[in-house]
Image: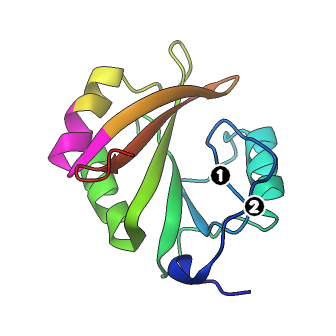
């Protein structure tokens, strides 16, 4: 099976809060011991393969980015993530929900995304302690 985002075929698979599909090539950034393991396992089950770690230099259909308030600059991180994101790709920004350590205010995300050249299209409750923000390039609102 190809590891290139542009050469893979996607197929329906088990639904996840982030709408990933079998055949997509997805990178994970910001993994730490506080991430939601059940969500990761559901994503990998839907993909039928492991998430690529942040050290892999390739082109991805989507990026899952776990981000906390004490991480470096969010705008810079979103800009950097786009260097490996395929045209039309999606960046899922996962942040701790309110009243949890590392929470990021939605206003900060709404400011960082357009500055970095992306647009927040939706939000989801990705896991019990994590909110998910779907970001796409400003020309890819789909």
Q: Nearer the viewer, residue 64 or 5?
A: 5
User: Is residue 112 depicted above or below 50 in this figure?
Assistant: above
Q: Is 123 included in the stretch rendered in magenta? A: no
Give the color scheme: rainbow, by chain, secondary structure or one colour.
rainbow
Q: Which residue is mark 1?
A: 20
Q: Position of residue 59 (x, y in %)?
A: 47, 77
Q: Which residues are magenta?
A: 111-119
Decide whether residue 118 is among the magenta residues: yes
> Callout 2: helix, strand or loop?
helix
Q: How many marks?
A: 2
- In the visual, does 80 lie left or right of 31? left
Label 1: how many residues lie within 10 Å, few (<14), some (14-19) or many (20+)? many
Q: From mark 1 to mark 2, how far is it between C-alphas?
A: 7 Å
Pinpoint residue 116: horizontal percent, then vertical percent. 21, 51
Left or right: residue 1 versus residue 99 is right
Where disc 1 sits, the SS reads loop
Which residue is drawn at the image coordinates 31% and 52% (left, top)? 140
Label located before the other in sequence (1 or 2): 1
Residue that mark 2 sits on: 47
Looking at this rendering, what residue extends furthest in the left direction?
Answer: 115
Based on the displayed image, in which of its 4 quarters is residue 23 positioned? bottom right
Q: Is residue 102 visible in the rendered structure shown here? A: no
Numbered label attached to residue 2: none
Asked if the residue at tag 2 contacts the one at tag 1, i.e. Cβ–Cβ closer than 8 Å, the answer is yes
What residue is at 63 percent from the left and 50 percent from the top?
A: 32
Q: Residue at x 39, y 46 (%)?
A: 142
Q: Quadrant of the N terminus?
A: bottom right
Residue 18 position in % (x across, y down)? 61, 41
Q: At 25% across and 55% down in the image, what residue appears?
A: 76
**Looking at the image, is 111 positioned above or below residue 119?**
above
């Amino acid at each position: 099976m190809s590891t290139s985002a542009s050469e893979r075929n996607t197929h329906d698979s088990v639904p996840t809060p982030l709408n990933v599909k079998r055949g997509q090539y997805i990178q994970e950034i910001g993994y730490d011991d506080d991430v939601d393991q059940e969500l990761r396992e559901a994503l990998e089950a839907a993909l039928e393969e492991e998430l690529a770690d942040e050290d892999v230099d390739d082109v991805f259909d989507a990026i899952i980015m776990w981000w906390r308030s004490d991480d470096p600059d969010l705008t810079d991180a979103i800009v950097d993530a786009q260097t490996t994101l395929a045209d039309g790709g999606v960046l899922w920004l996962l942040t701790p929900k309110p009243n949890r350590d590392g929470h990021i205010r939605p206003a900060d995300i709404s400011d960082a995304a357009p500055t970095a050249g992306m647009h927040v299209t939706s939000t989801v409750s990705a896991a019990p302690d994590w909110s998910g923000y779907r970001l796409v390039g400003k020309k890819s609102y789909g």
